[in-house]
Image (cartoon, helix red, strand yellow):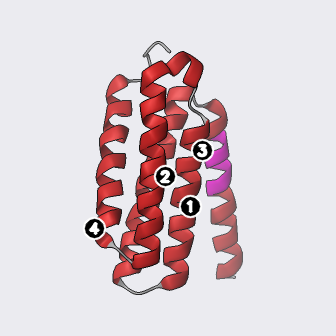
């Protein structure tokens, strides 16, 4: 009985997420990606601390996928130097995540969390009414 209720709750949450994504502006989508990135980085931190290897690997995979999505969403033509710098930063963050995953390095993970938090804060500060 609880299994079916749990599945129903997950399905409901998925529909809510998909609806939110479908209705989101490009700015809101970026903010949502950063929220997801920060969430998975936190999961990775706790998984390392608790030696939960499968959870750690899943969290790092999700975080890497979000970083890749942020990277491919850059408009290097319109974004110019800022987009180029973000591209390099995302590549660096990805490499540090790989190191954190392979070596269980909380230091490397903390660096990525700090960078992600700063960029996320900047996107939130820009606000949804910013002109592209």
Q: Are marks 3 and 1 in contact (CB under 8 Å)?
A: no
Location of mark 4 (residue)? 107
**Viewer-side label of 3, 2:** 3
Which stretch did the figure color magenta? 13-19
Give neighbour class at mark 2: few <14, some 14-19, many 20+ (Cα, 10 Å). Answer: some
Q: CA distance from mark 3 to mark 2?
A: 12 Å
Q: Is residue 120 magenta?
A: no
Mark earlier in primary sequence (3, 2): 2
Give neighbour class at mark 4: few <14, some 14-19, many 20+ (Cα, 10 Å). Answer: few
Q: CA distance from mark 4 to mark 1?
A: 19 Å
Asked which secondary structure carries label 2, the reply is: helix
Q: Are marks 1 and 2 in contact (CB under 8 Å)?
A: yes
Q: Is residue 18 in view from this perspective?
A: yes
Magenta stretch mostly in which secondary structure? helix
Mark earlier in primary sequence (4, 2): 2
Give neighbour class at mark 3: few <14, some 14-19, many 20+ (Cα, 10 Å). Answer: some
Q: Does residue 6 appear left or right of residue 78 in this picture?
A: right
Location of mark 2 (residue)? 36
* Residue shown at 69% from the left, 65% from the top: 8
* Residue shown at 46% from the left, 12% from the top: 131
Q: Does residue 10 appear left or right of residue 113 in this picture?
A: right
Mark earlier in primary sequence (4, 1): 1
Farthest residue toward the top?
131
Mark earlier in primary sequence (3, 1): 1
Q: How many marks?
A: 4
* Residue 90, position as x, y percentages in the image: 46, 45
**Viewer-side label of 1, 2:** 1
Location of mark 1 (residue)? 62
């Amino acid at each position: 009985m609880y299994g079916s209720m749990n599945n129903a709750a997950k399905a409901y949450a998925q529909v809510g997420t998909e609806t939110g994504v479908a209705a989101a502006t490009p700015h809101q989508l970026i903010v949502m990606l950063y929220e997801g990135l920060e969430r998975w980085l936190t999961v990775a931190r706790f998984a390392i601390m608790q030696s939960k290897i499968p959870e750690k690997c899943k969290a790092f995979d999700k975080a890497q996928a979000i970083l890749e999505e942020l990277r491919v969403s850059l408009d290097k033509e319109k974004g110019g130097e800022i987009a180029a710098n973000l591209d390099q930063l995302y590549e660096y963050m990805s490499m540090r995540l790989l190191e954190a995953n392979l070596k269980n390095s909380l230091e490397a993970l903390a660096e990525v969390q700090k960078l992600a938090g700063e960029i996320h804060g900047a996107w939130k500060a820009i606000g949804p009414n910013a002109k592209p």
